[in-house]
Amino acid sequence: MTGDALPGGVGGRVPFGARLAAAAADHGPLCVGVDPHPGLLLEWGLTDDAVGLRTFARIVLDAVGGRVAAVKPQSALFERHGSAGVAVLEEVVAAGRETGTLVVVDAKRGDIGSTMAGYADAYLRDGSPLAGDALTVSPYLGFGSLDPAVDQALATGRGLFVLCLTSNKEGHEVQHARTDDGVTVAAAVAARAAALNAGEDPMGSVGLVVGATVGDAAERAGVDLVHVNGPLLAPGVGAQGAGPRELTRVFGSARAQVLASSSRGVLAAGPDVASLRAAARRAADEAAAALS
Ligand SMILES: O=c1ccn([C@@H]2O[C@H](COP(=O)(O)O)[C@@H](O)[C@H]2O)c(=O)[nH]1
């Protein structure tokens, strides 16, 4: 799917939220993580260096490019190879976008506003080699510190996924803490995203990260996921233990907004391209059934 046939947003660009809704309708609500862990490179018979990374990423994109709604390269696993690894990440961003599959760069950036402007330039500016279709960002320097990223994303038809209820077991230490207003940090983050997405149809472009592993955390933390009116990136499917039942349970009536995300769960089927493709198809079909 390309965004071209969709109604235009700012400056005639199709906003990320609308592009993601269309991609999920076409291919199922699945994002495949491109996570070149050193152990996985070894299992695939590849070297733990930039050459291995490049081959790994090419195989994953051959298998799923143009066949799933989104791919999500994990920046840390490219960065660990220094500038050569970052160069491969740039290639993945370009190659992923060429296949028509949305690229979510998982870099979880967050800093004071003036530095955040630098990250926004790097990951969300037209023409930047690291700019995919969306970026994961951290709101823990204050949601307002993300303003440069919000502005750049909305101006260029890109999206953000703001960490809200993360899939790791430690997330609640910060996310369930209460602000001066008595609401949880997670609920405050979700409310800010909701304000940015208000009135957008089919949904806005400022999404949240809500792990598929979090059980009833949204309810406990007072997070109204439907009201967010934006995409919900749900990592934790597969290797972290969540499956179709958890997707249905965690997201309830917000199911239509969810982009389930699995990295190792799909990548375990590699390096054979046909097996990887089949694993991604299975995961996408399961997510679609759980979220329908
Ligand atoms: O809350 C979060 C936010 C991001 N992630 C990232 O997603 C993948 C998960 O990989 P699996 O192999 O499917 O477990 C990884 O890149 C994480 O950094 C997350 O897991 N939880």
Image: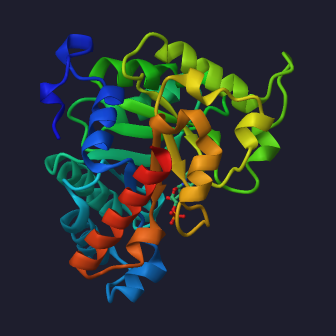
Quadrant where the image shows the C terminus: top left
The chosen color scheme is: rainbow
Above or below, 59 relative to 65: below
One can see residue 107 in this view: no
Q: Return the residue nearer the eye: 76 or 1.
A: 1
One can see residue 223 in this view: yes
Above or below, 78 relative to 170: below
Horizontal and vertical percent position of residue 83: 34, 59
Q: Is residue 240 left or right of residue 135?
A: right
- Residue at left 59%, top 41%? 251
Q: Return the residue nearer the eye: 152 or 290.
A: 290
Above or below, 168 relative to 202: below
Horizontal and vertical percent position of residue 17: 36, 28
- Residue at left 66%, top 26%? 224
- Residue at left 34%, top 85%? 44
Q: Quadrant of residue 128?
A: top left
Horizontal and vertical percent position of residue 89: 31, 56
Q: Quadrant of residue 42?
A: bottom left
Quadrant where the image shows the N terminus: top left
Above or below, 181 relative to 125: above
Q: Quadrant of ligand 1?
A: bottom right
Horizontal and vertical percent position of residue 215: 71, 50
